[in-house]
Image (cartoon, helix red, strand yellow):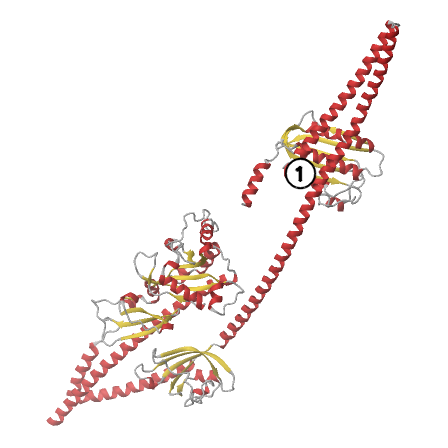
Amino acid sequence: MRTQGYLAFVVGICLTMWTCVAVLDAQQARIVAAFQRDADKVATDTNVRLQTYFDMLLSIKGAFAVNEQVDRAQFARFVRELNLTTRYPGFQAIQFVRHVPAADLARFTDAVRRDTRLVAEGYPTFAVHPVVARAEHFIVEYTEPLKGNEIAFGLDLAALPPHLQAVEAGRDSGEIVATERITLVQDDSGQPGFVARAPVYRQNMPLTTVAERRAALVGLVAIVFRVKNLMHEVIEPALLDQMAFRIHDAGNVSDGAAAPYAASNVMFDTTRADRPPLPGVQTEARLNVAQRQWVMRFEALPGSRYSRDVRPVLVIAAGGLVVSTLIAALMIASRRSRTLAQQLSVTLDEQRAFQDSANVGIALFSHGVIMRCNRGLEEMMGYAQGELAGCQTQVLSRAATAGAADPFAVDPHTRRWQGELKLMRKDGSTIWCLINGKALDAADLSKGGVWVIQNISDRKHTEAALVDAKDGLEHSLAELEQQKANVETAHRDLSTVLATLKQAQTNLITSEKMASLGSLVAGIAHELNTPIGNSLLTATALADMVADFERKYADGGIKRSALEAHMADTRLACDIMASSLRRAGDLITSFKQVAVDQTSDQRRRFDLCDLVRDTLATYAAQLRRANCETRVDGPASLPLDSYPGSVGQVLSNLINNALLHAFEGRGSALITITAREIEDDKLLLIFSDDGVGMPPKILHQVFDPFFTTKMGQGGSGLGMNIVYNIVTGMLGGSIEIESTPEHGTSVTIRIPRKAPNRESEAADVNMLLM
């Protein structure tokens, strides 16, 4: 009995020790599994968050692809609408880097300083820094938000080798490219950071070769990150005290990404010397970050999350002692084991039901064979329940031929696989699926892996539709560019024709003015003919009377009555000659003033009523021939500070227009000129006639150049156009015309007493042209 008791005690002690070891192993497995889940989550969340930011970067690039002339205000509004500061606050700034050849550097700097689209005062202190002599520059032109990033505004990346290397790589590849670890110029804390940039190319330019991409480069859009902010956004705060994180940049993927951990390439590090990690609880993950690879190392720290609980061990030890002493306890323990087995069976059944209810496929693949799968995968691929188990993975992917690599093989480096594959259903149709695989045992890949398969065919069809829509939009943009080129060609041709027409118009206006002056000379000559002829006739008669008087005087027979008669005749002749010559002198004075005004067009002070009377005097002969009466209604004096030549030209053209068009077929006519002062220090001049008037169609075109109803009959079509240009341009006034057939025409002109300063306006125009 003693021997049996001793053996029972020894067996109990052995069972107790075995149970304690099993509990410790279970706890260790639980700790490792929990730690691996946390590490995988952090790595996945980091990758997802970076991809989200890169998608935002591509959306900004898309805005520049549609309109490469995005200005500062549009860029700021686009970034503001993304609302990244609230949704994803892990970035430092979003920028646009402009590619500027050295020859355009001064012009670019001046344009930024005068850019008032976002800030009313512009950026008068803007300067490119640091100064470097290069054939081309890459300058930060837009940065949002500007507050806190002012030092980056105008930064020339060509002077900074790490930035320049990444910029040139992005330009040549057309992909998003990240920099190595850098210290941000706007960050005084010296924390590690990096910048991801995507190139922007000009529209409708070939991008097949590196040379073509370099020639088409407009600039790059960029997101600036502080890695500490990014990781604190991704990592749950509770994990920071339970796990140590260390990230270092292993270098460019194209170069093998084999750089070892060093202080110079650390991106993020929370390890502490005073808190050593738990032994054996660590892992690594590699992330591809815009053509570079980050190595993430995770280490568990002592604490509540990953610590072992010794209390179950103590309880089991005590229980073992009790079991060793009492056989009943052993029986109870045996009975408990059976109960746990039943519970485990129930739990497995519930887990299997849970997996079968999922709408994604879950399967265990090993050595190219489908070991197990849930009902979701069978329904997705069109198989009956249990039909896929034991089949080769080739039934899912026809691309896997004999001797080819297994598409469902786990990557030996990352111990996982993720990607998109086109899978074959049982009926021969294909579907696109998102595949995620992970090794069951990272130390032994032969055990196979668990794969989660999700049907993404609808998303693929949507992406294809978006690509087709993009191609259609690009085609439409190309057609618009061609139409724009055609319009520009037509515009150049029309500009040439317009310049020719303007030159012809200038020549015709000059001819019109010279013809008007010639008509003025002819009228004055006709008016002078009468008084000068009267003076000549009277002088001849007086000479005859003097000769007759001298003859009588020589004969000595002069009587007092004869002398008195001779003196009366002489006095009458002198009066006639004086009156005639005075009339001629007045006409000549009016002609001189009108002629000087119309030829010199100098500004001076003059009286409007005097100018009206002088102008009418020069047309006296033409008005008499047309049997036209003139009436002037106005005050005695209306002084102006203006251009008398231009006012006289307006009156002359209106008189000529009336004589040529208004009184055709009429025996008598009347022209009324009304002048008076109105409000706002302006004068009103109304020129009206009782002629034939104009229909609405002609009235609508009366001010058009080269429009006339007397083409080839003395009309040039420029008279009323000259009137309109002089009144609205040189005199700074306005003109209106009213006319009804058979009820005459009325022209209303409003001009300021003081005409605009043409010299200052010309100087302003020259300044604008410069």
The front one of 481 and 635 is 481
- Quadrant location, the N terminus: bottom left
Q: Is residue 72 left or right of residue 250?
A: right
Residue 245: x, y in percent? 29, 69
Q: Measured along the vertical axis of the image, is residue 573 above or below residue 120?
A: above
Whether residue 210 is visible here, answered yes or no, is yes
Residue 552: x, y in percent? 88, 9
Q: Measured along the vertical axis of the image, is residue 142 above or below residue 429?
A: above
Residue 708: x, y in percent? 76, 44
For disc 1, the marked residue is 726
Classify mark 1: helix, strand or loop. Answer: helix
* The image quarter in which residue 323 lies: bottom left
Q: Residue furthest left?
A: 2
Q: Amino acid at mark 1?
A: Ile
Q: Residues within 10 Å of mark 1 (few under 14, many from 20)?
A: some
Q: Is residue 427 left or right of residue 386?
A: right
The front one of 433 and 759 is 759
* The image quarter in which residue 133 lies: bottom left
Q: Is residue 689 left or right of residue 478?
A: right
Whether residue 354 is visible here, answered yes or no, is no
Q: Is residue 60 left or right of residue 449?
A: right
The front one of 405 and 428 is 405
Counting labels gives 1
Residue 209: x, y in percent? 48, 69
- Quadrant location, the C terminus: top right
Q: Measured along the vertical axis of the image, is residue 165 above or below residue 499?
A: below
